[in-house]
Amino acid sequence: MNKNGERHEERTREYDVRNDDNEGLSQAEFTEIQPLIPVGNNVERYDDLAVEYDVWYDANERLFEAEVAALQAIIPDGYGLEVGAGSGRFMKALGIDRGIEPAKNMRQIAKTHEVLLDEGVAEDLPFPDGRFDYVAFLTSLEFVADKHTALTEAKRVLRPGGRLIIAFLNAASEEGRQLVAAQNDLPFFEYASFLTADQLMELIESHGFWCHTVSQVVGEDDTFEVLEGHGDGLYTVLAAIRP
């Protein structure tokens, strides 16, 4: 964590994120590798898998620490919201003020981590306009049925100049390609809709956000680091500015 912390300033300097990676997939290429995703209810699925979901963080402590470090580098000071906060692990680690989660069992487990979550969904945030300095989707946007409405809502509750934070599993990375190919056999990801970094940037820019920085977690065997750019690591974080 100390080594990662020393590199935060370097990693988060402003740069042209689109010029950083030539390994993104075109829409046609992505469509070719993306299997047909079954229609399913992610809320029910994660209600059933809540305990298994929460245990992952203890079993993968080093990777979780690297993911937190990547997010600490881009989350600003101020009043924040996490959308789809799961069992509250990131909220607690990052000191995020508010969180919503539709799965009841997730909210119950979050209480054991001393995190209180509001019930709610990304497409209908129960907060007034301009309430937050930042809104975070931390590997939750993949599981949102209507991403356009979710981003419209995120923009609504952000103040002008506020920051949109998205952590996602990059479908253009080697691990991402493997995940997409196998997702129908993986209970946690069966109903997910994965995006490449370029596709996500295009999506958020269509809602008026300006993409500020992108970084990724890379490594193996419990040795991880956070690097600028995208394409090599599965876990990728993006920060964008609301106009």
Image (cartoon, grey):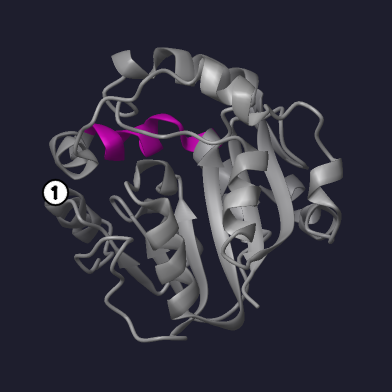
The structure residue drawn at horizontal position 47% and vertical position 36%, both measured from the top left corner, is: 61
Secondary structure at badge 1 equals helix
User: Magenta segment range?
Assistant: 52-62
- Judged by its main secondary structure, the magenta piece is helix
Q: Please tell me whether residue 58 belongs to the stretch shown in magenta.
A: yes
Q: Position of residue 37 (x, y in %)?
A: 33, 25
Q: Position of residue 7 (x, y in %)?
A: 80, 52
The structure residue drawn at horizontal position 61% and vertical position 24%, both measured from the top left corner, is: 28
Residue nearest the observer in this picture, 50 or 30: 30
Q: Position of residue 217 (x, y in %)?
A: 65, 37
Image: 242 above or below 107: below
Q: Residue under label 1, please give it.
A: 105
Question: Could you classify mark 1 by the number of other residues whose Cα lies within 10 Å: few (under 14), some (14-19), or many (20 or more)?
Answer: some
Asked where in the image residue 8 lies, by quadrant, the reply is: bottom right
User: Horizontally, is 174 left or right of 3 in the view?
Assistant: left
Residue type at numbered disc 1: Asn
Question: Looking at this rendering, what residue extends furthest in the front direction?
Answer: 28
